[in-house]
Amino acid sequence: MMTIKDIAGLAGVTPMTVSNVLRNRGRVGELTRQRVMEVVEAHGYRPNLTARALVERRAPTLALMLGCITNPFYPEFTLQANNAARRHGRFLLVCNTDYEPDSGTRFMADVAGSLSDGILVANTGELRVEELKAIQASGTPVVVSVWEFPDEPPEGIPCVAFDSRKAGRIATEHLLELGHTRIGALVASAKKGIHGGRYQGYCDAMRAAKVKHVLADAHFGEDSYQGGYDAAIALLTTRPDLTALFVSNDLPALGVLNAAASLGRSVPGDLSVVSITNIELTGQSRPALTTVSIPTAEMAEASVDLLIRLIGQPGAHVPMVMTSDPVLIRRASTAPLQASPAPSRSR
Amino acid sequence: MMTIKDIAGLAGVTPMTVSNVLRNRGRVGELTRQRVMEVVEAHGYRPNLTARALVERRAPTLALMLGCITNPFYPEFTLQANNAARRHGRFLLVCNTDYEPDSGTRFMADVAGSLSDGILVANTGELRVEELKAIQASGTPVVVSVWEFPDEPPEGIPCVAFDSRKAGRIATEHLLELGHTRIGALVASAKKGIHGGRYQGYCDAMRAAKVKHVLADAHFGEDSYQGGYDAAIALLTTRPDLTALFVSNDLPALGVLNAAASLGRSVPGDLSVVSITNIELTGQSRPALTTVSIPTAEMAEASVDLLIRLIGQPGAHVPMVMTSDPVLIRRASTAPLQASPAPSRSR
């Protein structure tokens, strides 16, 4: 197979010039460009991306660190990040950490600066900021995305954030406007964990509406379908008087819908359920889930764009990128509070 | 940053020897090994994967071509393929073709032999065999996975297959054993398309049970949630006498469950529904979906193992790899035929 060096030798230029011609960049005279292209075409040369990356002193991919690709949020985020990377002529290397920070560490040590010249970290609440800073200091830009706490950006690491607290407030205000006051909160993390901002938004809305809420109305647990199912069974068994539930994430909220059916509670007749994110599945559940949409596609694109910019301008100072406000998506899982509770139906 | 050449120079060996030592392979004398490791440790050297790949004349990743990462089958397949690749010390480059064969072609042209030294194609029914053979002939092994037609393997391309026809038969036999005879088929492809084997299995079982079935009982359409929803509405409206549905894939079957509810048909009381694949979501629907499990994890692992073997032994003759038989997973969407149809309930 021809290498870029062979082409350069035949055209009487440096490999860097060949690379510049093939990528339409740098200053190359028109005659030189033509000579290079004649050699390239005469030999049917296709650039070796690995070699090209070495010649250009850069690695050929962007790495995306994520929790687990089977959690349906991540494929949606990955698809958008992938499309954005392709628009920049880059490939995305998907690194599945299984929510293990050690696994993320190993991945990054393996790819940073060699296979990948930029690292995009989808925040899972397990950030090791010092580690990311060390990678950044070694010359490989790092961007943290899906950051939930715009008031407290990770120090020294560029991030792309959304207003999770506002999302929690919008979801809860929707329930309050429907007349609900006995609103439980199912939070899919610890109180100060990754969904802490969303829970604060719930508290903000309850406080603003002067509705008393006590910690007994809240449950803190796991961010999974089964976690939501179990939490709803537990909370609704001890607090059957709740008429609505704020759930901090869609996947557990889908479990909540199923738990309500198991308990003979009709949604939305006996119980309203609202959540946050707007993954595709929320339009497919029965009833379809009312949720607050966060700007997943926008965050993925903005993160890749930012990473590409940092690769081109190492050391550039980048303030946090803030994305669009969350938006309520009204579907069929929420309804006005009924004057007297509907009779509970078993199925 | 130290390069492998610097290490080689300091240790007085070739870069290939350094590479062999770091990868624990090749024949290297114990004294040489010790000398290399002393230099490596003294300089805190971490191998540059891109450079290493060039030294070893191989590309650093395996490419996985798939239809769309947001179709929930693919994340499950990708997770297993990724874990298998990691066990071989490799990274998986996920190439999302959006079900566009042209997009697959462009991806493969970009990565084959440069960024990736092996290509794994998750079959989506849009294979361009001649193209795959050309890539193979240029020295980059190709493996087709999730192959549905073990009787007709793609000529000249190694593949990892499962018995889709048997899966269709098992699903339909389950309905027959429950006493159903008016069994419709919702096929999420054209009749001779990717789910053609699954449909043949349905026909086999109907024929063996001497149950008459006519083409009017079948609907051929799209492999999506909405495709299943629309097809079920259409078929059950024209054929309300059907008491059971065979659906060729889980994602459309989840749409079928929702369509049944929209039509006031209770599942499984008025209508039994069975499908094929066993994606995680089938355990989370209400009712949980009875399905025939195909060996997704086994196929992903076998495919990566085969690809690695072909990379090590270019030109090795590999017969088709056949994976375990499909298995019925009984859940809540199927029930014995009722003596007289249950009254239809609207919700």
Image (spheres, coloured by chain):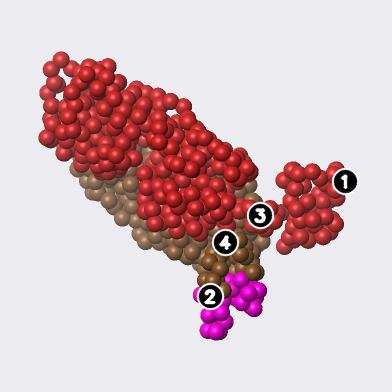
Chain colours: A red, B brown
Q: Amino acid at mark 4?
A: Leu
Q: Is residue B83 above or below residue A236?
A: below
Residues at marks 1 and 3, CA–CA distance in whole angstroms: 26 Å
How packed is label 3: few (under 14 Cα within 10 Å), some, or many (20 or more)?
A: few
As for residue B34 lying within the magenta part, the answer is yes
The number of discs equals 4
Mark number for residue A31?
1
Give me the chain letter of mark 4. B
Q: Which residue is mark 2?
A: B37
Numbered disc in front, either 2 or 3: 2
Give me the chain letter of mark 3. A
Of B166 and A201, nearer the camera is: A201
Can residue A222 be seen here? The reply is: yes
Q: Residue at x 66, y 61 (%)?
A: B138
Whether the residues at callouts 2 and 4 have beta carbons within 8 Å, the answer is no
Q: Amino acid at mark 3?
A: Arg
Residues at marks 4 and 3, CA–CA distance in whole angstroms: 13 Å
Q: Main secondary structure of the magenta part?
A: helix
Q: Is residue B24 above or below residue A27?
A: below
Which percent across, then down, holds residue B275?
33, 44
Q: Which residues are magenta?
A: B7-36
For the residues beneath circles 1 and 3, the answer to whether they share a chain is: yes
